[in-house]
Amino acid sequence: MNAELKRLHSPDIYDLENYKPESPTSFNFLLQAMIGPAGEDGEESFDIDVCTPKWIEENCEQDVVLIGRHYLIVREYNYKKIDEFIRKFLLSCVGEDWNEVANKVARLGFWEFEDYES
């Protein structure tokens, strides 16, 4: 089974394809990659913070330590490059079932069912 990017969404940005950050070199926003099994209906949300190195520098106090998990760090906003990067990353997310695949995708973004126990 493989993962497939169904669509990209952001609650912070209305039109991702035409978005122009107020500060092109310093921004951060939530990107929700809606991903599901390739060739099948259904999608689940994987949340990614997209930011620039300058934004991290400006928003990280000197004595703070950050974990970089679920951050996509870019030099500038380019929708096409972000979309292509995610699609390429998903090529390596293969498994026997959706749970195995989704756990690999969760390295990129916070899976809405991460740490879920039934």
Image (cartoon, grey):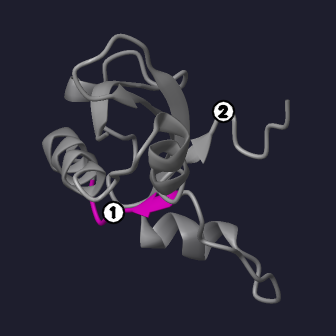
Task: Say left or right for 56 vs 40.
Answer: right
Of badges 1 and 2, nearer the viewer stands 2
Q: Amino acid at mark 1?
A: Val
Q: Amino acid at mark 2?
A: Glu
The x, y position of residue 2, in whole percent, is: 29, 41
Q: Tell me, yes or no, whether the highlighted magenta stretch contains residue 72.
A: yes
Task: Say left or right for 33 vs 39.
Answer: right
User: In the rendering, which numbered label is found on residue 110?
Assistant: none
Work out whether residue 7 or residue 117 is closer to the camera in this orientation and state it: 117
State the count of labels: 2
- How crowded pointer 2 is (Cα within 10 Å; few <14, some 14-19, many 20+) is rated as few
Q: Residue at point 45% right, 72% down?
A: 53
Quarter assignment of residue 59: bottom right
Q: Residue at point 46% right, 57% down?
A: 51
Q: Is residue 68 above or below residue 51?
A: below
Find disc 1 in the rendering and name its residue.
Answer: 74
Task: Say left or right for 111 vs 88.
Answer: right
Pick the quarter of the image with the C terminus.
top right
The x, y position of residue 44, in whole percent, is: 51, 25
Find disc 2 in the rendering and name its residue.
Answer: 112
Q: Tell me, yes or no, whether the highlighted magenta stretch contains residue 78.
A: no
Task: Report the magenta residues as a range.
Answer: 71-76
Q: Residue at point 39% right, 41% down?
A: 22
Q: Secondary structure at mark 1?
A: loop
Calculate the distance from the C-alpha at mark 1 to the C-alpha at mark 2.
23 Å
Q: Secondary structure at mark 2?
A: loop
The x, y position of residue 30, in whole percent, is: 54, 38
Can residue 19 be seen from the camera position used here?
no
Q: Sequence-wise, which precedes: disc 1 or disc 2? A: 1
Q: Residue at point 28% right, 59% down?
A: 92
